[in-house]
Amino acid sequence: MLHVGYDIRPALFDYAGVGRYVRELAVALTNLPDDEGPFLEMFASSWRGGRKIPPGLRKDRCRMHRGPLPGRVMELLNRVPGLDAGRVPAKVDVFHWTDYTYPAVRTAARVMTLHDAAFVMDPQFHGWDTAKLLMRVRHAIAQADRVIVPSEPSRTDAELLGVHDDQVVVVPHGVSPFFKPGPGRLGDGDYLLTVGTLEPRKNYLRTLLAMEKLWARDAAPDWVIIGRRGWDYEGFLERMEGSKYRSRIRWIEHLSDTELLRHYQGALAFLFPSLHEGFGLAVLEAMACGVAPVVGEGTAPAWVAGDSAMLVVPKDVDSIAEGVERIVHEHAWRRQAAAVALRRARTFTWERTARETHAVYHQAVERHRARGPVARPA
């Protein structure tokens, strides 16, 4: 059985986005059969002391290493010879960098998940210091034995960052059985729904302009937005608050998973013309609830949605408006698309993600043994 160093920290503080991926994957890995899964040594040091312990972890297949030191101090400690994250807080065969922080690892194989490289496409697409982030990610890529990306379109992101073809592996995310259709006919909700952080790449401002065009002709239902404040969102909020159609927009910053499920189930369609994503987990969750999505053509969410998607040009307000109008008024198509969405969503499971990730761990260990440990970073 492989012993895997697993950075669980994103799941301790945030259950959305990356946090949900880290949580669900950890649970699925620990619940693989004994002869098919790893033992997780969970890297959990943080001065904030996250308390969101993922439910469902099989306790005899994992160990949480909180430790007395905050995460950043641990990362400095791991740079000391003999104290890298392959040995401290536990000796492991492979370490999985699950987010955009990379504890130093020299004595174990290294796997990184590259969720996306939106910050390379446009510096406004990320809230961090882009130059520092880019340098940190490229340094990790140079050390990684395998790089996991969540979709075929995200291979392009990996290529932009210099990942070699033999280094990258596509492992799609899954969706929890928790997300399922509600009572009633598929595709017959009474509002449009968007779920995602308020940030530039989510394309909220263009989407609002498209919705205003439709509301002017009473050609679309109300719009519900579920998402916390991210960065560079002020222009959108100003336009939203000043809109003559403000009463037709409901913005909710935080919801429990139970409330989120209810909102997915009640939606007519899922509106997500994002400019760039690595996967589009919210799109998949909506599909699992029997809701057809409106997504940008050529994007990872379009890959996830397959034939269930209404495709639009995300930088074209008129195209977004046309796509929304069609999905609202072409009832037969929408209901058929909702059924296709539900069937396709059922092919994305966290068990599959866990099995394929476990296979990547073995590949990384073999490559690490072949090439030997990396040099200590300066």
Image (cartoon, grey):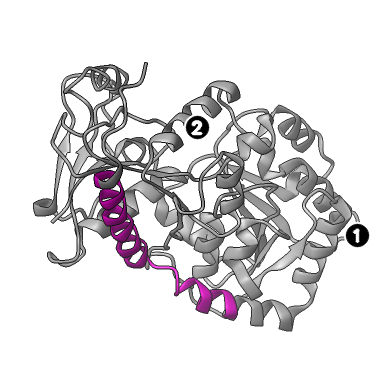
Give the residue at mark 2.
138
Residues in magenta? Answer: 340-369
The residue shown at (16%, 29%) is 88
Label 1: element kind: loop
Q: Nearer the viewer, residue 98 or 345?
A: 98
The residue shown at (59%, 22%) is 131
Task: Please tell me whether residue 284 belongs to the stretch shown in magenta.
Answer: no
Label 2: element kind: helix
Residue 162 position by quadrant: top right
Residue 305 position by quadrant: bottom right
Predominant secondary structure, magenta span: helix
Left or right, residue 325 beside residue 282? right
The residue shown at (43%, 65%) is 179
As drawn, 192 above or below 13: below
Give the residue at mark 1.
217
Q: Is residue 121 visible?
A: yes
Of the two numbered discs 2 and 1 on the same chain, state the one appearing first in sequence: 2
Q: Nearer the viewer, residue 12 or 161?
A: 161
As drawn, 93 above or below 259: above
Q: Nearer the viewer, mark 2 or mark 1?
A: 2
Mark 1 Cα-neighbour bin, 10 Å: few <14, some 14–19, many ≥20: few
Left or right, residue 316 beside residue 93? right
- Name the residue type under label 1: Arg
Which corner quadrant holds the C terminus? top left
Which corner quadrant holds the N terminus? bottom left
Q: Position of residue 174 (x, y in %)?
A: 42, 62
Q: Residue furthest right?
A: 217
